[in-house]
Structure formats: structure tokens, C-alpha cells
């Protein structure tokens, strides 16, 4: 990404929405262009032999097919929309997408065995060996993407009250952290998740019950209760998580040197986590606590059911567990019931959520600009923002910048030979490609990233009103793309700290 220096005011970061696979021919990929040529060929052949009625019929049918291939509709081609809709409706009719936990069905499984819906069914959560004084860290094994990772809970004071210079300093340190990840051979992804959730007041209630004087005057009690009700009903708290992961291919050799198996992969990850702790604290993080299986189960459980946080917090305060070994079993981490997902929302355990992909603006953005997406407008509402980073290898980054430069040069030369002038958009893309190539040549890393946001409310509330408020908060800053027909998977990306959410490669029309 490119950062434009400003004489006054915050620094603006531009070039954040570069497509990974841009179209070559009128914005089409080679596959789309070949499909269009194949569909147009019968029409041209019929016209060449004078079969005009046949040519007209073929033009109608093939023209519709070409429109399905090339016309983008809210981030996807019309043909892909049609395929996704058919698969979605097939899943609804066959009841493949209805999910109920084993415990709710009366056949509970082993306590350590995950019981999770949707894309989480592919994830395993084995325990690693003890890590420093934080107990046995729970590893996250994504079997579909062949990735191993770990999640930590962070405490941070936030950036809302920082000056522009302090924000700029934090942005530079975040860049240094991503560069450091790119120079490591074991991990290549980092996900940051922020959840702004209603404060249920459990911690205060337990503290007050332990410290309240039995002889306190009735008027003082009444005044305190009124203040608690007034302030507590609008209070919110923030949860911050970071997930670091690497591929099986990158972990295999150091894991074998460390003894192999789950323990070997854990030791290979632990060596990286040691260094990441210090770099996270340079970003203003006060504490970094790598989660055990019980702690990660609670983070997933409260993601599905925010109301469960009160009971879990009360249990921790009344029966503390310094080692973090006991607590919620992984079998109880998921929801009790998740009915068939709606096309535009996801319902789970008495709550409803809407998830979005956050698209970066052409004009650029500033550090901390995602903050308004976390501004809770109604007591009882929860909002989340997740940023998933993947640091590309130097070889992959070089290939990407060379392909971008070659594509821009070809299009510029073609327009020049045909007598067309280059547009401002062409010049911006060419300038961005040159700046990106210079940065990679200087040793900087190229980072793929995606941003997801969600809003969750109790099932009885009007979900569309709260979704509209989130869209209003993003208006003028970002464009929110509602991930229709995939709300269950989008919810995992936006609200659960398991590191799932970055696609392998973005298409030209995505």
C-alpha cells in the first residue's frame, strides 16, 4: 500500500483496493473472454452464411449467456450468483444447512471434541504443550486450508484519543510487525478481531456483593441502584483478539526437528509467538494471553451467544482457575441451534447477525478510520470488526508486481497505438504499480488483507434497522458489501477469533 505524506493532518493511505486478478480484455479475465468468444462464434458463423433468423435466435440466447458471464452484480458475476442461489436453495430444501448441537439432541460427544456448525466443522482444536506460564495453548488446525495457528486475548487502551503523530507511530509499528512476519518461515497470516459488546455488569455485581456494607442506608442503596441501572444499561466493553497462523508446508520441517506431531508443530509456533508478544506490546498492547482450549471455547461461545458471557464471567470470579485448564469444554463452544441461514442474515442461539465485507475507498483512508464501525448505537447491540492479513513471500510479491507492471504497459501501449488517450484512472493504476514495485524492490512486503464487520442483536429485534445503522456509520468512509447467501461463513470471519476469513485469491469481479 502507498502512504501519501500530508503537510498537515493525518497521513492518508491509498492503493488499498488493488485487485489481485484484474481483467485483461475490457475488464474480463482470459476465461471470461474465451467464453464470450465461444458464445459469439455461432452468431458470426450464422451471419456469414446468411442465416439471419438463426443468427437472431442465437444472438438472443448467447447474448443472455454472455450477460450472465460478464455482468457483475454486487461483487459476483451474474452466472456465479445463479449458481450460488441454486446451491443455497438446494441446501435449504434438503435441510443440509440446519444444525443442532449433539448435546441438544441428547447424544453429547466427548468433552474435548468440538461440536461446531458450518465451516467450523473442518477445524480441530488440539492442545499443545505448556507455553511459558500460560498453560497449554490451544492450537487451531484448519484441515481445509492446511493451516496451524493460535489465538491470544489482548488488552489495549484504544486509539480514539491518540494524536495524529501517535497514530502514525502505531501505523509504522504495525507495518514493522507485518514485515517481521514476512521474514519468518513459519507463519504468514495474522488476524485482528475487535468485538464491542454490551457490558452485562457481572464483574461489578460480584464486587458489590462482596464489598457492600450490610448497614448501608436505604437511600444510599436506592441511589446506587438507580445509577447502576442508568449507567450499566448503556455501558459497553471491548474484546480484542489476535490469531497467528502458518501453513502445514511451512511448519512440517521445523515440526519434525522438534519431535513431530501436534507437539512439534506447537513448539515451532511457540518460537514465533515469543517474538510476536514484544512487537504487539510495541503497538500499545498491555497484556498478551495465549488462549487455552477452555478460554478459546468461551471466546467462540460468546461469539455465538453474547448472553452467555454473564454466566461464564460469574463462574470465573466465584471459582477462579489460575491455570486456565478447567472451564467450558470445547464440545460446548458452539451454538445450541442454528436454523437454516437466511439469504441476508444468520440466526444463532436466539441472536441474529448480519456480516459485511468492508471495501476500501479509492480516495484512501487514515489509521483508525474503522472505529465508527464499532460505535454501538443501541444498548444490547454488538458490533465486530476483523482484519485478516497475509504477508506474501518475496517471490510471490515480485511476481505480482511484475504482472501488474506488464499488464499496465500492455494496455497503455495498445491505447497509444489505437490513438486513445490514457485516462486518469489508467495513470493512477500505473503510478500505483510503479510505487508498489519500488517498495517491493526495496525489501518491503506485499500484504493481502480483507476486512469484515458484523452487527448482532437479539432475535426479536428488527435486524434490518441495526444493519442500516452500521451502513450509515460506514457511509462516506467505506463501502459495505453484504455477503448474501454466505452469512454463516461471513459470521465466522467477522465475529469469531479462529483466523478464518481471507480467501485464497480474489477474482476479477469479486
Image: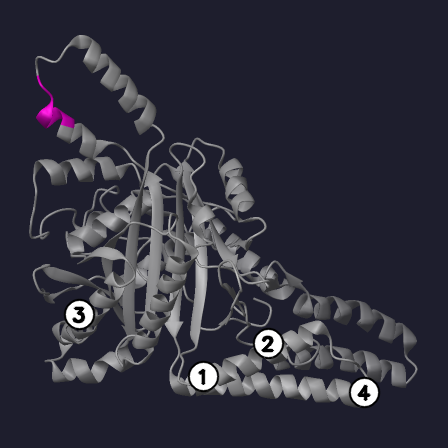
Task: Decide which of tag 4 and tag 3 comes sooner along the chain.
Answer: 3
The residue that label 4 is drawn on is: 418
Which residue is most to the top?
218
Asked whether 211 falls inside the magenta stretch, the response is yes
Mark-to-mark CA distance, 4 and 1: 33 Å
Task: Decide which of tag 2 and tag 3 comes sooner along the chain.
Answer: 2
Of the residues tagged 4 and 3, which is closer to the observer?
A: 3
The residue that label 2 is drawn on is: 22
Q: Which mark is residue 440?
A: 1
Task: Decide which of tag 1 and tag 2 comes sooner along the chain.
Answer: 2
Of the residues tagged 4 and 1, which is closer to the observer?
A: 1
Q: Quadrant of residue 21?
A: bottom right
Q: Which residues are magenta?
A: 208-213
Mark-to-mark CA distance, 1 and 3: 27 Å
Examine the residues drawn in magenta and state their main secondary structure: helix
Mark-to-mark CA distance, 2 and 4: 22 Å
Amino acid at each position: 500500500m502507498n502512504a501519501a505524506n500530508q503537510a498537515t493532518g493525518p497521513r492518508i493511505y491509498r492503493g488499498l483496493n488493488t485487485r489481485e486478478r484484474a481483467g485483461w480484455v475490457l475488464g474480463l479475465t482470459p476465461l471470461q473472454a474465451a467464453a464470450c468468444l465461444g458464445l459469439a462464434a455461432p452468431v458470426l458463423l450464422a451471419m456469414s452464411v446468411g442465416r439471419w433468423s438463426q443468427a437472431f435466435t442465437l444472438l438472443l440466447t448467447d447474448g443472455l449467456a454472455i450477460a450472465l458471464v460478464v455482468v457483475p452484480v454486487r461483487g459476483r458475476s451474474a452466472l456465479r450468483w445463479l449458481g450460488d442461489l441454486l446451491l443455497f436453495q438446494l441446501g435449504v430444501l434438503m435441510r443440509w444447512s440446519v444444525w443442532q448441537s449433539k448435546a441438544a439432541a441428547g447424544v453429547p460427544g466427548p468433552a474435548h471434541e468440538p461440536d461446531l456448525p458450518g465451516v467450523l466443522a473442518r477445524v480441530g482444536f488440539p492442545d499443545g504443550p505448556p507455553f511459558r506460564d500460560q498453560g497449554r495453548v490451544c492450537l487451531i488446525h484448519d484441515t481445509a486450508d492446511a493451516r496451524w495457528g493460535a489465538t491470544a486475548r489482548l488488552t489495549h487502551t484504544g486509539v480514539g484519543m491518540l494524536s495524529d503523530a501517535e497514530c502514525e507511530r502505531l501505523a509504522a509499528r504495525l507495518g514493522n510487525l507485518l514485515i517481521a512476519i514476512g521474514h519468518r518461515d513459519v507463519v504468514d497470516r495474522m488476524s485482528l478481531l475487535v468485538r464491542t459488546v454490551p457490558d452485562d455488569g457481572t464483574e461489578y455485581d460480584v464486587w458489590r456483593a462482596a464489598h457492600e456494607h450490610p448497614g448501608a442506608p436505604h437511600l444510599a442503596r436506592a441511589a446506587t441502584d438507580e445509577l447502576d441501572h442508568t449507567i450499566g444499561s448503556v455501558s459497553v466493553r471491548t474484546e480484542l483478539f489476535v490469531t497467528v497462523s502458518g501453513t502445514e508446508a511451512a511448519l512440517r520441517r521445523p515440526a519434525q526437528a522438534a519431535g513431530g506431531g501436534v507437539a512439534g508443530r506447537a513448539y515451532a509456533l511457540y518460537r514465533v509467538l515469543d517474538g510476536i508478544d514484544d512487537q504487539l506490546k510495541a503497538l500499545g498492547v498491555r497484556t498478551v494471553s495465549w488462549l487455552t482450549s477452555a478460554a478459546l471455547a468461551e471466546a467462540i461461545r460468546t461469539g455465538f451467544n453474547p448472553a452467555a458471557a454473564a454466566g461464564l464471567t460469574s463462574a470465573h470470579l466465584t471459582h477462579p482457575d489460575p491455570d486456565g485448564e478447567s472451564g467450558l469444554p470445547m464440545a460446548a463452544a458452539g451454538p445450541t441451534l442454528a436454523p437454516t441461514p437466511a439469504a441476508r442474515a444468520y440466526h444463532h442461539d436466539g441472536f441474529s447477525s448480519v456480516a459485511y465485507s468492508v471495501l476500501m475507498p479509492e480516495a484512501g483512508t487514515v489509521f483508525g478510520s474503522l472505529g465508527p464501525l464499532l460505535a454501538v448505537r443501541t444498548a444490547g447491540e454488538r458490533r465486530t470488526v476483523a482484519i485478516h492479513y497475509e504477508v506474501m513471500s518475496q517471490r510471490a510479491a515480485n511476481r505480482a508486481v511484475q504482472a501488474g507492471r506488464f499488464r499496465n504497459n500492455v494496455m497503455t501501449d495498445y491505447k497509444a497505438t489505437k490513438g486513445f488517450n490514457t485516462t486518469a484512472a489508467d495513470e493512477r493504476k500505473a503510478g500505483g504499480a510503479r510505487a508498489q514495485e519500488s517498495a517491493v524492490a526495496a525489501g518491503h512486503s506485499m500484504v493481502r488483507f480483507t476486512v469484515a464487520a458484523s452487527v448482532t442483536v437479539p432475535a426479536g429485534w428488527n435486524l434490518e434497522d441495526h444493519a442500516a445503522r452500521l451502513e450509515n456509520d460506514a457511509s462516506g468512509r467505506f463501502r459495505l458489501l453484504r455477503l448474501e447467501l454466505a452469512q454463516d461463513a461471513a459470521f465466522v470471519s467477522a465475529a469469531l477469533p479462529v483466523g478464518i476469513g481471507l480467501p485464497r485469491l480474489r477474482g476479477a469481479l469479486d
